[in-house]
Image (tube, rainbow, N blue to C red):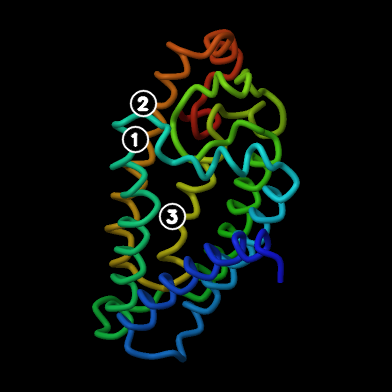
Amino acid sequence: MSTQILKRIVPVLFSLAVTSLCLFASSGRLNWSNAWILLALNLAASVTTMALLWRDSELRTERSNIKAGKSWDRPIVFIVVLLGPMATWITAGLDTRFHWSVDMRPMAVIAGVVVGGLTASLVAWALHSNRFFSSVVRIQKDRGHVVVSSGPYRFVRHPGYTGMSAFTLVTPLILDSRWAFVPAVATVVVWVMRTTLEDRTLLNELDGYADYARRVKYKLVPGVW
């Protein structure tokens, strides 16, 4: 196995290991089908992201440059990428273990899985459409940063955040845990904060973004906000 392939696979395996540890340690069992479904969705999303980044070495390098963003963005990234999801997984596992809430209807779980797959696809579409899809908030002048208005960016200004927020919200459905909505909703509130701050940064610092914002009025949800 080449070094490049190994570098791409290790983060995926590490992410799955952290997710698995949170889910199964908190639930106290491995035979939790809802957790395995969530892991399968996460694996599919991670492999898709890896495949998309494989064809674009510049974007791959940009997404690994996590120190280059705005200073205010670092604690936000820590919350939405690590702390919030971990709190959601652990809460769901404890809920399953100690039966804090009654099970949801099977159709709610199925709906969560379907919507989870669709939202993960939206994130992949945004990544495919935007060669400036960075992990941090920064104006990429060194890469000739311009406004992207194709793909899902025709409908909302931050479709990647739309997909990530929606996936966060349906995770409690997938895991069949009502209590998991508490950290999930809190995490989405932080996603909304990041969207607001990033949008303001782009309006102030990226040429052409103000015109784009006049054409595409909504940040996350068409017809809502």
Local secondary structure at mark 2? helix
Q: Nearer the viewer, residue 206 or 142?
A: 142
Does the CB distance between marks 3 and 1 fall below 8 Å? no
Say above or below: 51 vs 113: above
What is the CA distance from the residue labelled 3 to the residue labelled 2? 20 Å
In which quarter of the view is residue 86 placed? Answer: bottom left
- Lower position in the chain sequence, tag 3 or tag 1: 1
Amino acid type, mark 2: Leu
**Label 3 vs label 2, nearer the camera:** 2
Quadrant housing the C terminus: top left
Label 3 sits on residue: 168
In which quarter of the view is residue 98 placed? Answer: bottom left
The residue at the point 53 percent across, 36 percent down is 134
The picture places residue 70, in percent across and down from the top left corner, at 36, 29
The picture places residue 74, in percent across and down from the top left corner, at 33, 40
The residue at the point 29 percent across, 85 percent down is 97
Residue 197's tag is 2
**Label 2 vs label 1, nearer the camera:** 1
Viewed as shown, does residue 193 lie left or right of 43?
left
- Lower position in the chain sequence, tag 2 or tag 1: 1
Does the CB distance between marks 2 and 1 fall below 8 Å? yes
The picture places residue 170, in percent across and down from the top left corner, at 46, 59
Amino acid type, mark 1: Asp
Other-residue count near label 3 (Cα within 10 Å), few / some / many at <14 / 14–19 / ≥20: many
Q: How many marks?
A: 3
Local secondary structure at mark 3? helix
Amino acid type, mark 3: Thr
Local secondary structure at mark 1? helix
Say above or below: 163 vs 157: below
Label 1 sits on residue: 73
